[in-house]
Amino acid sequence: MKFTIKRSAFLKSMADVQRAISSRTTIPILTGIKIVANEEGITLTGSDSDISIETFIPVSDESNTLIIEKTGSIVLQARFFSEIVKKLPEETMEIEVLDHFQTLITSATASFTINGLDANNYPHLPVIDTNESFHLPVGLFKQVIGQTVIAVSTHESRPILTGINIVIENGQILAVATDSHRLSQRIIPLEMTEEQAGKKYNVIIPGKSLIELSRTLDDNSETIELIITENQVLFKTENMFFYSRLLEGYYPDTKRLIPETSVTEIEFNANILLGAIERASLLSHEGKNNVVKITIHPDLVEISGNSPDIGNVQEELDYISVNGDPIELSFNPDYMKDALRTFGQTTIKIKFTSPVRPFILVPSENDQTFIQLITPVRTF
C-alpha cells in the first residue's frame, strides 16, 4: 500500500474514527486504526466492539489531494500514529507499507517507520442486512441528542438506563432518557413510507454512542440515514458509517411518570432562571445536601440555598406569570441547570403537582414535544 494525501483531510477522518477506539479494550488489535486503500479512496476504521466508525476519503474530491500508487491495507497503533501525523512538518504526507507490515510515514524531510498489524486480523464490522432506513435532519437530531442525553444514567447497576429509548411510529420519533431522578423527552416529526408508518420500532441506544455520534456529525451535512437491525443501529452520512450496539431489555414505561395535571404553573425566561440557580448552587455545593429551595406565592417567588458551614443565599426571582396554589419544594440544582440549558433563550413553564411529586419544565410555546422532568428532594 502506498499513497500521498493532504494531511488536514487525513487528520479530520482519523479524529472521527478515534472516537470509537478505547485503550481499555481486551482485543489488542482494536487499539489500532485500520487503513484500507483502493482505487476509489481510503477507508479508515476504528472500533471498541460497542461502537465502530468507518470514514471514507474519496480520490474524486480534489481538496483531499489523494494519490493512490498502490492499494492495500494495514492496522496502525492509533495513539502513536495520530501523534506522528499531527506533528509532521508539511501539509502533504506519504504512507507506504513495507515488508513485514513495517509502515513508512514521510513528510518533507521527516520520516517515521512504525510496526503495523495485518488488517486481515481486524474484526469484521456488523453486517446490516436490511434496506429499511429513515432520513433525519442532522441539526435537529443533534439537538434531540443534546436535550435527552443529560438524563441518561451513569450507573451500570441498571444498564438499560444508560441508554436513550428511541421509539419510531406514527410519523414521529420519540426519544426519552431517565436515571430515575429526572427524565428528558423529545418528539420530532419523521418522514416515513406507508409500509413504515404501520410499524413500530423500539430500540435503546447507549447514551455514550449518541454523544460520540453527535461529536462526529458535521453541521454541513443535511441529513443522516438511520438503519435499525435486531442488535445494531447504523447511522450513515455521505462519507461516514457509525455503528452502535443496542442495549438488550425493556425500557421502563416512562409515560406514567409524567404528570398530566398541575396545581401551580409559573413562567420564566429560561436563561434568567438559570443565572439565579447558578448563584444559589454556589453555596449548596459546599453543604452535605446539595439542594436549593423554591418558594412560590401569588406575589413573591423566591429561591434559597443554605450551607451550615458557609452561610445562606436568598434571591427574589424575576418571573413572567404565576397561577395556582402557593407551593414550596427543594430540588437538586445541578439537575435544574442541566434541564434549563437545553431550552436556550426561550421562555418556559414549570408545572408543579405537589412538594413531593415530580415537576416538569416545558417550552411556553409548545408543551407537548419537549419535556424535562425533575423529582424534588425531600428535606423533612
Image (tube, grey):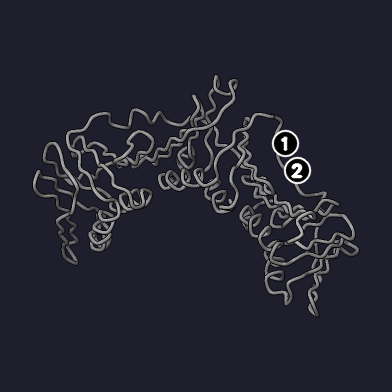
Secondary structure of the residue carrying tag 1 is: loop
10 Å crowding of disc 2: few (<14), some (14-19), many (20+): few
- Where residue 114 appears, as percent x and y from the top left, is 79, 68
Q: Which mark is residue 124?
A: 2
Count the numbered circles shown. 2
Residue placed most toward the observer, 283 or 187: 187
- Where residue 341 appears, as percent x and y from the top left, is 36, 52
Query: Residue pushed farthest front?
Result: 62
Given this view, does label 1 or label 2 mark the residue nearer the observer? 1
- Where residue 210 appears, as percent x and y from the top left, is 53, 46
Residue 356 occupies quadrant: top left
Determine contact: label 1, label 2, CB under 8 Å: yes
Quadrant where the C terminus is found in the figure: top left
Secondary structure of the residue carrying tag 2 is: loop
| In this view, 18 is above or below 147 | below
- Where residue 36 appears, as percent x and y from the top left, is 80, 53
Q: Which mark is residue 280?
A: none
Query: Image check: 227 left or right of 59?
Result: left
